[in-house]
Each structure stands twice: as structure tokens, then as C-alpha cells.
Amino acid sequence: MAVFTISCSNNDSDSETPHEMKANRIVKEISENTTKTFAYNDQNQLVKIIEIGKIDAFGVTQSVKNYTYENGKVVQSQEDYTGSTSFTFRYMYGYDSEGRVYSMYVQKRVGSENYNDFTDIVFDYTTPNVIKLKDWRMDGNTSISVLDVVNGNITTNSVYTNITNNNPNGVLNYTSLYSNYDTKKSPYESLPLIYNYPYSSANNSGKYESSGTTITYTYEYNADGYPVKKTSSFDNKSIIYEYERI
């Protein structure tokens, strides 16, 4: 016969209920000069981002970006920007059979109704764990970006410019390195694939290196494993993230 003994303790931690981890969606992002507010529909889809930025002590900028969905994916977004100058960009997205972003076509509004072609970007996933983007700008400045992805996180981003018919691969302009990822969730986990163009990493990078500059990042997290504060070693400034549980 087995005998089970139940002991009692005055230590409150012994009786605490384990925290139930839940998904979060970001609702606000605050930095020194900008505040972004994220709005969602009843299907938990991002439908609008309002970004208020500070130009100087006397002026602000505002960017409003609206998202349109078909079959659960963003097919179009429009950004209206007002500040010292004002403009509107319209973005159209295509997807491949695996649901990955395949193309992004950008137009800039001229006048009250007319849109001019601005850039055409194609995503290439032929090489495993590599995303290659070719950006055809209508002003003739074409570039290629090559992203190496490991465990869902970008590790390098190499950008090539001076693309010509005689030199279709271009010349390496710069390479950015991302490392020291944590195992926590990205603040943008709930957002569409195209939000953090060209790619949203699954976790949070602790180190960035490019062109002789090295920046480290430290994080504070909430009980669900999402960063609530990101601080840069470059200027000791922080970004604050606010969420709601879903």
C-alpha cells in the first residue's frame, strides 16, 4: 500500500499557480522620437499602423498605413505620410504556392489620383536558407539583397549595387551581421510576413555589425516571453513594446 503525505508550507511560492503562457499581439511601440500604434480587426489581422514622429520641438510627422487582405494574406497596403512634405505609397504583394512573399510592387501617388510606378521587388527562395531579393527601381538604381537565414533568424544581409547588363550580380556594397539571438519571441510575431520587410526574424538579435560599427542590444521580457524593452549600446536609448494577450 502506498502512502502519500501532503505537507503544508507558509511559503507563498509553493502554492503559486504556474503562469499560463499566451500569445501576445503588439499594440504600441515607443521610442525616443516615434510612437507606433497597431490596430486589428475581429480576425486578429493587422489593419492599420499609425506612426507619430517628432521632427523637432515645433513639428511632428504622421504615417498611416492600412492593410487589405484576401484569403488571410495581405495583398495591398497604403501608406499616407504627412510632415514637412507629404506623399502616398501603395504596395501590392504576391505569394508563391508555399505562402511566402514572392513579389512586392510599389507605386507612388502623384497628384490626387494618379500613381506612378516606383519599384518592383522579386523574392527568390531557390537556395535553401537563403532569400534573394532583386529590387528594380524605376529611376534605374537596381540592387540585390541576399539574406542568410538560420533557425528562422537573419544572420547576414549582403547588399549589391551597380547592377548592369554586363555585371548582373553587381558589386558588394555592404554586409550586415546579426547574431547573439535570444530564444524569446519577436514582438512582431503576430504581424503579417511583409511587416518587417524584407524578413521578420523569429527571435531577437543581441548584436549587429556593419561597416565597422558594432551595436549590442539588451532586452527585458514579460511573463509570456515577449520583449517589453530593447536597449541599444550605441546611444543607450530604448524601445518600449506594449502588448495585449490573445
Image (tube, grey):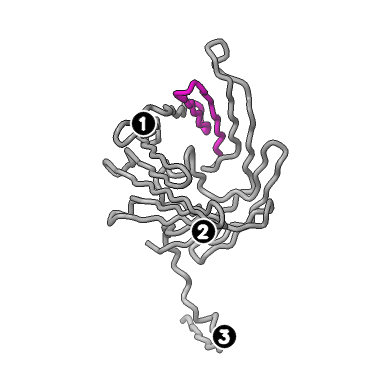
Work out whether residue 59 or residue 178 is closer to the camera in this orientation and state it.
59
Q: Earlier in the sequence, mark 2 or mark 3?
A: 3
**Circle 1 residues within 10 Å: few <14, some 14–19, many ≥20:** few
Secondary structure at numbered mark 1: loop
Q: Residue 125, position in %: x, y?
A: 46, 29
The answer to whether residue 93 is visible is no
Prevalent SS, magenta region: strand
Q: What residue would you read off at disc 1?
A: 96
Secondary structure at numbered mark 3: loop
Q: Which residues are magenta?
A: 127-150
Point out the frontmost of discs 2 and 3.
Answer: 2
Q: What residue would you read off at disc 3?
A: 11
Q: What residue would you read off at disc 2?
A: 30
Disc 3 marks which amino acid? Asn
Q: Is residue 59 above or below residue 141?
A: below
Q: Residue 77, position in %: x, y?
A: 35, 41
Residue at (44% x, 67% y) in the render:
20
Give the number of marks. 3
Residue at (55% x, 19% y) in the render:
163
Direction right: furthest residue = 212
Q: Is residue 233 above or below residue 222?
A: above
Disc 1 marks which amino acid? Asp
The answer to whether residue 165 is visible is yes
Point out the frontmost of discs 2 and 1.
Answer: 2
**Circle 2 residues within 10 Å: few <14, some 14–19, many ≥20:** some
Q: Would residue 77 appear left or right of 15 to someone viewing this image?
A: left
Magenta span contains residue 148: yes
